[in-house]
Image: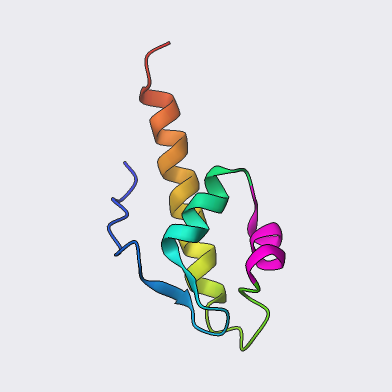
Amino acid sequence: MPRQIDFPADEIICHCSGTGRAYIRSLFKQGMDVAAISRWTGALSGCGGCEWDIADFLQDLARQENASRQTAPD
């Protein structure tokens, strides 16, 4: 079972671009991958300190989405 994603929605995950978790979640739900999110927001294009946080966050979102699909009634 995927872990619950309970980070504050307004938490800034990329301080160089000022991009928050809620915005990244929104872009992910629109179908953007990490490269598209980086181009759109500027995240991952500065110091690189957010690279692992964003990658882990997107993996968690993908796992959560897949788990929801598997448990959703047909």
The kind of secondary structure the magenta stretch mainly shows is: helix
Residue shown at the point (45%, 38%) measured from the top left = 65
Q: How is the image coloured?
A: rainbow
Q: Does 63 appear above or below 69?
A: below
Residue shown at the point (59%, 43%) measured from the top left = 30
Q: In which image quadrant can residue 51 be found?
A: bottom right
Residue 71 location (% of width, % of height): 36, 24
Quadrant for the C terminus, please. Answer: top left
Q: Does 73 appear above or below 11?
A: above
Query: Which stretch appears magenta?
Result: 32-41
Confirm whether the magenta stretch covers residue 8. no
Residue shown at the point (48%, 63%) measured from the top left = 56
Residue closest to the far top: 74
Residue 57 location (% of width, % of height): 46, 60
On the rendered structure, is 68 left or right of 35?
Answer: left
Q: Does 40 appear above or below 15?
A: above
Residue shown at the point (62%, 43%) measured from the top left = 31
Q: In which image quadrant can residue 42 be found?
A: bottom right
Q: Nearer the viewer, residue 27 or 49?
A: 27
Residue 19 location (% of width, % of height): 51, 71
How many circles with numbers are drawn on the protein? 0
Quadrant for the N terminus, please. Answer: top left
Residue closest to the far bottom: 47
Residue 60 location (% of width, % of height): 43, 53
Q: Nearer the viewer, residue 6 or 18?
A: 18
Confirm whether the magenta stretch covers residue 33. yes
